[in-house]
Each structure stands twice: as structure tokens, then as C-alpha cells.
């Protein structure tokens, strides 16, 4: 499987498809439709009881997406959390995540695939 990370994000190329229980996010790049939007973020991962949080340090595209989704989707609840002077993304612990690899990185590739209509959960894969 090949992933294409988008360096210069164009909001006009985002395709949001409303399904029965969720919104599917796709991106059009040179007439090719990509499932999800792959973005790179920089930050530090910290472990908590039932989750990991990635404290963001460099994240222009992800903030742009977050603002865009909040204006387009009525049920949207930001996946970027704010606490004091920092912003972070919360990731629930699961058996698919490699704890050692996740905690030792400083940059991450996230594929934002969609959102649930009912509980505002964002579908994000960590690549």
C-alpha cells in the first residue's frame, strides 16, 4: 500500500461524503482520489492511563483541517484538544499501537479518514 503525504493542502480539493452514520473524507490530487487526508505532524507523545497524547509542536496543515471541518460539518467536534498553552491529539490505547515506537518518535503521519455523526469520533490511522 502506498501513502501520499500532502505538503501543500488545498481545501478546495477535500471531498466530504455524507453517509448514514458518518462523514467520509477523501482528497483529490491531480485527478486521483485518495482515501483520507495524510498529514505530517511534529510533537511529543506522552502515555496516560488509557490513552496516548501527542503534544503538537509543528502542525499547520492539521490546524487548517480542524478549522475547515468545524465550518463545514455541523456535528464536528475538534479532534485537537487544547490545554493551557499547548494543543494535542488524544489516541486511545489499543493492541495495534506499538508503544515503544509511538513514544520514541517526534514526527507522525496521520491519515484522517472521516468522522462519526453520533459521537463525533474522528477516524485517524497512524502510519
Image (cartoon, rainbow, N blue to C red):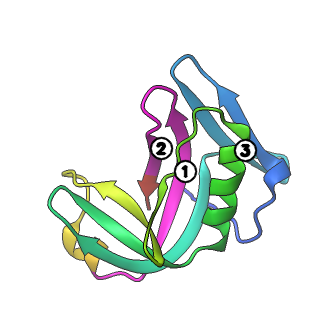
Q: What secondary structure is the stretch in magenta mostly built from?
A: strand
Q: Is residue 57 visible?
A: yes
> Are dots 2 and 1 in contact, CB under 8 Å?
yes
What is the spatial separation of the Cα atoms under label 3 and label 2, in whole angstroms? 16 Å
Say whether disc 2 or disc 1 marks the residue closer to the N-terminus: 1
Q: Locate residue 67, reporting x and y percent.
A: 68, 55
Q: How many marks do you count on the picture?
A: 3
Q: Label 3: few (<14), some or many (≥20) within 10 Å?
A: few
Residue drawn at x 61%, y 64% is 62
Q: Label 1: few (<14), some or many (≥20) within 10 Å?
A: many
Residue drawn at x 27%, y 77% is 103
Q: Is residue 65 left or right of residue 112?
A: right
Q: Which residue is mark 2?
A: 122
Q: Label 2: few (<14), some or many (≥20) within 10 Å?
A: some
Say whether disc 3 or disc 1 marks the residue closer to the N-terminus: 3
Q: Secondary structure at mark 1?
A: strand
Q: Is residue 82 above or below residue 16?
A: below
Q: Nearer the viewer, mark 2 or mark 1?
A: 2
Q: Is residue 106 above or below residue 78?
A: below
Q: Which residue is mark 3?
A: 71
Q: On residue 57, which mark appears?
A: none
Residue drawn at x 44%, y 62% is 127
Q: Locate residue 14, reporting x and y percent.
A: 75, 46
Q: Locate residue 81, reporting x and y percent.
A: 45, 60
Residue drawn at x 36%, y 59% is 90
Q: Nearer the viewer, mark 3 or mark 1?
A: 3
Amino acid at each position: 500500500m502506498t501513502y501520499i503525504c500532502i505538503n501543500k493542502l488545498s481545501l478546495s480539493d477535500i471531498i466530504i461524503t455524507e453517509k448514514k452514520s458518518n462523514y467520509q473524507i477523501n482528497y483529490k490530487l491531480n485527478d486521483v482520489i485518495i482515501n483520507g487526508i495524510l498529514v505530517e505532524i511534529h510533537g511529543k507523545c506522552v502515555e496516560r492511563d488509557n490513552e496516548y497524547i501527542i503534544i503538537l509542536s509543528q502542525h499547520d496543515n492539521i490546524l487548517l483541517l480542524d478549522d475547515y471541518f468545524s465550518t463545514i460539518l455541523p456535528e464536528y467536534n475538534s479532534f485537537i484538544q487544547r490545554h493551557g498553552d499547548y494543543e494535542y491529539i488524544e489516541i486511545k490505547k489499543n493492541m495495534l499501537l506499538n508503544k515503544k515506537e509511538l513514544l520514541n518518535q517526534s514526527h507522525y503521519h496521520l491519515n484522517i479518514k472521516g468522522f462519526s455523526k453520533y459521537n463525533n469520533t474522528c477516524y485517524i490511522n497512524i502510519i
